[in-house]
Amino acid sequence: MNRRDALSRVALIFGGTVIGAEAFLSGCKTATKYGASLNFTPDDTAYLNEIAETILPATNTPGAKEAKVGEFMAVYVKDCYEEKDQKIFMEGMAKLDEACNTKNGKSFMECTPEQRHEFLVALDKEAKDYQKSKKEDDPTHYFSLIKQLTLMGFFTSEPGATKALRYVAIPGRYEGCIPYKKGDKAWAT
């Protein structure tokens, strides 16, 4: 997925259901029993950074790794996800690596950027197909959780908000009507 597609879909994602949105809006709850023992190692964080960077690579704007999206995901999953979603996320990290190993004969971290991209595009299609056909009580696909957190972590980070989006520090002057030219960046503020 290129950055332009990602930017155009952010509004859809933030306007739609985001796992953990209640916690994001009302403040995170105290850690659940599962979350209290949930620890992300530096290797886990590096792994999440590589997945996020494959989803939102650096171009003429910073990538997800520069925005430290892996660290964001680790904190958000531990502090804000409900126990069932924490479990899906943690198991999903292992499933993603297993599926990559099955497809490419090596772990995600050992794959080339092209192999990673190709693999995640296929996994994204699988997640979308699953979401379309799942029943109300079925869990969310693990890749949907990872992708949602990647986008949220990136676009709420300083590099994402100030370099990928247009940003004006608040408080600032209010202009109710600003002309839009096709190809302009979306506003972060």
Image (cartoon, rainbow, N blue to C red):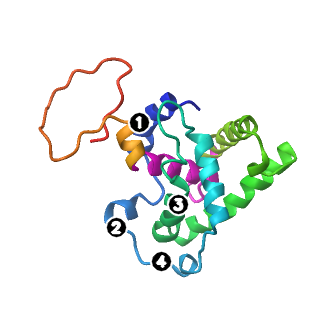
Could you say where residue 39 lies in the image, as x and y percent from the top left?
Answer: 60, 74
Q: Which residue is mark 2?
A: 27
Q: Which residues are magenta?
A: 133-157
Q: Is residue 137 left or right of residue 31?
A: right
Q: SS of the residue at dot 2?
A: loop
**Distance between the alpha carbons at the discs numbered 3 and 2:** 18 Å
For residue 187, what is the image quadrant?
Answer: top left
Q: Are marks 3 and 1 in contact (CB under 8 Å)?
A: no
Q: Which residue is mark 4?
A: 31
Instruction: Kindly identify the residue that appears in the image at 45 percent across and 49 percent down.
Output: 152
Q: Nearer the viewer, residue 153 or 98?
A: 153
User: From the viewer's perspective, is residue 189 above or below residue 146?
Assistant: above
Q: Which residue is mark 1?
A: 164
Q: Which mark is first along the chain, 4 or 3?
A: 4
User: Crowding at label 4, few (<14), some or many (≥20) Cα neighbours within 10 Å?
Assistant: some
Give the total of numbered labels.
Answer: 4
Q: Which mark is first along the chain, 1 or 3?
A: 3
Q: Are marks 4 and 2 in contact (CB under 8 Å)?
A: no
Q: Which residue is mark 3?
A: 71
**Distance between the alpha carbons at the discs numbered 1 and 4:** 32 Å
Query: Looking at the picture, which amino acid does disc 2 mark?
Result: Gly
**Distance between the alpha carbons at the discs numbered 3 and 1:** 19 Å
Magenta region, mostly helix, strand or loop? helix
Q: Which mark is first along the chain, 1 or 2?
A: 2
